[in-house]
Amino acid sequence: MSINCRLLSMASVTLCCWLLATYLNDAFAIEHTPPIAADSVTENQITQGVVSYEVNGQLKQMLALDTQVNMKVSGLINRVTVKQEFTNTEDNWVNAKYVFPLPENAAVDDMRLRIGQRVIEGKISPKQQAKKQFEQAKKQGKQASLVSQQQTNIFTTELANIAPRQKVVVEMSYLQTISYKDGQFSLRFPLTVAPRYRPKTHQGPYHPSTQVESPILAESATAKLADNNSHHVQMDVEIDAGFEVTNVVSHYHPVTEVNDGRKSYVSVQGNVPLNRDFVLSWQTHSGDEVAASGFYQQGKTHQDKVSQRSHPLAINGDQSNLYDSKVESSYAMAMLMPPNQSIKSTHKVNRELVMVIDTSGSMMGDSIVQAKKALEVALNGLDVADKFNIIAFDSYVNQLFEYSVPASARNISHAKRFIQSLEADNGTEIAPALNAALSESVDVNRSTEWLRQVLFITDGSVSNEAQLFEQISFQLNDSRLFTVGIGSAPNSHFMRRAAEMGKGTYTYIGQVSDVVEKMTQLLDKISQPVLTDVQIEFADGTMVDYWPSAIKDVYQHTPVVISFKTDKPSMPAVVISGKIQGQYWQKTVDFSSRTSSQGLDLVWANAKITELELYQTPMNKQKTAAQVEKIALDYHLVSSQTSLIAVDVTPANINATALSENVARLMPAGWRMNSAFNKLPQTATASRLWLLSGGSLLIFCLLYWLWFKGVLPGQRQFNI
Amino acid sequence: MLLSHFKNKTSGKQKFQYWVLALLLLMAFAMVFKGGYMQAKAHFAQYLIERAFEKTLVDHQPHKPWSWADTHPVAKMRFISQNEQMIEDDVFVLAGLSGRTLAFGPGLYLGGAGAGEQGNTVIAGHRDSHFLKLKYLQVGDVIEIQNTQGVYSQYQVTELRVVNENQIEEMAASDDSRLTLITCYPFEQLSANASQRYIVEAKATSTANMI
């Protein structure tokens, strides 16, 4: 009897402990390891570099993908070589399509296709012609690769007719300008592309915008996304900053770094997943005064396609080759560097700060939290003499004040309550928001002494960029437009160009921990303009062919870069002028003693193309297209009008029955609300488990009680 | 505890067993209450949500179903199925996919298309309450959705599939008008953790204005 009793007690205590443990596990375990499912074996096989997916009920395997990036930075120019490896793991011939996200200011000028030991050079052709050549090669069963531009920062690579088990390496080179901000040089390599939201008013009155193919696997939703370790990237960066390099930081990826005076070598350790952009920044020692410096290059990078093939090293610095060939022109880049010392308080300009915040559904999650923090930083940084206003927008516009109000304590606390009430919802209708910021909230009776600065905070996932640019140029007047990109993948192309037009800057904030620091820097900077109304001309008074045509104001810690060219074989000195607190300022930049840089012609050509497209209207569309095509062909650039194509001459595929295949892209981190888990929403509760276990325990208690009372059938016998 | 019980065999034994019984009873009731509360919340909240949605239909403004709610109804959903086990009552969809929202009703993913809009309309719900009935849905069945403007949209189920929870491309935007219903899988599983999701994919067939 007593042994029975003890056993039962022990059993019940054990049961209690188990239930308690289960409860604690449910209540506190945030990331619960799911039980191993029966089909997990096949999933494990898939994650080892191969992705399988289904089309028409047939299980297929996706191509394994490996990306290697090599960067060479000289001054403000970054020469990048990207190498993509595709392996056809199928027994069939395959047609694949790969969307490539380039940095927003990149200019592609070279491509190579390697199949086994053969190397095929790419060439620039007008877009339609390239497409025709590509299709023809495809029909003939030849191997071909085509890189074309969808929007300025998205390139597509088509790979036709890849033989079974064959490895294809696509190598492309592009030139990128390095951004310099707050004493910091930085480069960004986008590793993912966000799905873009298309508003209802897509076919706008300003511009018949063309449909953009979404780079996300919308149509092949059945395909299984790659686990992180099947998409690999390897990066090597060589920095030659011109000055002594200090403080080299990789923001999201672990790197190894070797510093050697003005040079620095950075490489990413091992392979990293493609769900975060690679951001690298560094600093240099600079002077105490407003400084102007020049970079100079004689002749074009792609002087002659034929001579270049015979001298493959011509691009990489064989200068004698350039002098030997016919030199028609020289190219230069002038950089205006602000002083290091902080500005005097008596020179402070009063500002009217209008903050526009995106509260659309795509801002949900991390992004809205970041944006709210950013607004609070902005409010805290306001001077009593400043004025401010806040405009929130999604599908609708929600304006805090009719016109800007003084930054009094009362107004600011009112604004803070307004910020707290903001929620992410609905679509992104940027046009009405811009209208409110640049037109409706402008007080016609305001004093023009106030510098009107519009701070536009958004994730900018919008496709109808051209018509928004049009609107900005109509409504801007004397407002300056500063854009702030929030989240893991803002449309930096839109943001930067909008800022370009508004003589402002673009700030990218990827991590919540960066918000306060970066916003403080931005607000600090826009309160301190050091040089305004900049102009450039040759020392002899002749006009300079420079881009961008709207030269920005120089702010504290923000240099201004101007690209220009001359038809003379050597670059004459230029005079750069501007205003410092109303006072006239000028500086002469002499190029005679400069050593030659590389790729300045590409920078110039790309800046000119960007500018041409920026001011494109439906009226001059044909003309602009022709101009862009001519420049792109001249300078060997991929653009909206030209493609880079590489076709193999030897037929490889006799029966051209290739399967089309899209390589899956990983979603950017933080795109969805539950970014910490990167999973579909959790759609189960343990309610039934609780009911069942609670019920079982009740029955157990009943039995226990009956046993305790001695009324169970067995016990009665025992008692008698 | 066991040791003391061992020492006072006669007097302590009864006392101890009463304590154990009381403890077990308390736990049993707590568990039944907890499970029942979840179910009751899911069931009865729908009536309050229905009331809020009716108000929304009148003035086209969002209304909170109860004053402290952090969400509002955005659509009414009805399954029209040939399956006899499918009970045809309305389900009211709330805005957002947070755990708090899903406890009261299925949630609409705000980063995707709205109810009846072009694009991918994503709605997720709990497999043990509102979306339990998804297991009776068959290909060809019709799902009717009424949005806050009173507009009815009909979707026809085109595919039923089971995916891994990592396959977030199910929530990606699309060019066509489609409805993606998400719930946990398998339906019979009791725990709150599931690594698989049951996806109901439906394509728009018609949109008709009520007024």
Image (cartoon, coloured by chain):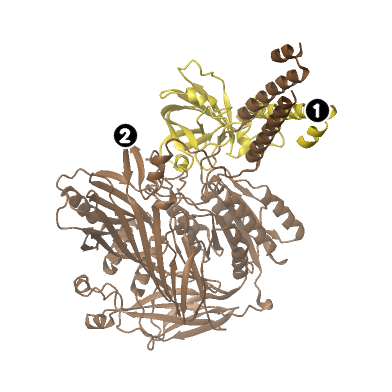
Of all residues shown, which one is farthest toward the bottom? A593
Quadrant of the image containing the N terminus of chain A: top right
Going 56% across and 49% down the picture, which residue do you hit?
A676
As drawn, A713 above or below A305: above
Using a 10 Å C-alpha cutoff, classify the residue at mark 1 as few (fewer than 14 neighbours), some (14 to 19) or many (20 or more).
some
Drawn side of residue B40 relative to residue B109, left or right: right
Residue identified by numbered label 1: B13
Residue placed under numbered mark 2 in the picture: A56
- On whether disc 1 and disc 2 are found on a single subunit, the reply is no
Helix, strand or loop under label 1? helix
Q: Position of residue A443 (x, y in %)?
A: 64, 58
At 66% from the left and 34% from the top, the residue drawn is: A19
Query: Does A117 sit left or right of A202 as displayed?
Result: left
Q: Colour of chain B?
A: yellow
The quadrant of the picture occupied by the C terminus of chain A is top right
Residue type at mark 1: give it: Lys
Task: Tell me where residue A539 appears, x and y as whole percent.
Answer: 41, 86
Q: Which chain letter goes with mark 1?
A: B
Q: Residue furthest right?
A: B11
- For the image, the number of numbered tags is 2
The crowding category of the residue bearing disc 2, from other C-alpha atoms within 10 Å (few below 14, some 14 to 19, many at least 20), is few
Out of A446 and A681, give the one closest to the viewer.
A681
What colour do you see for chain A?
brown
Dot 2 falls on which chain? A
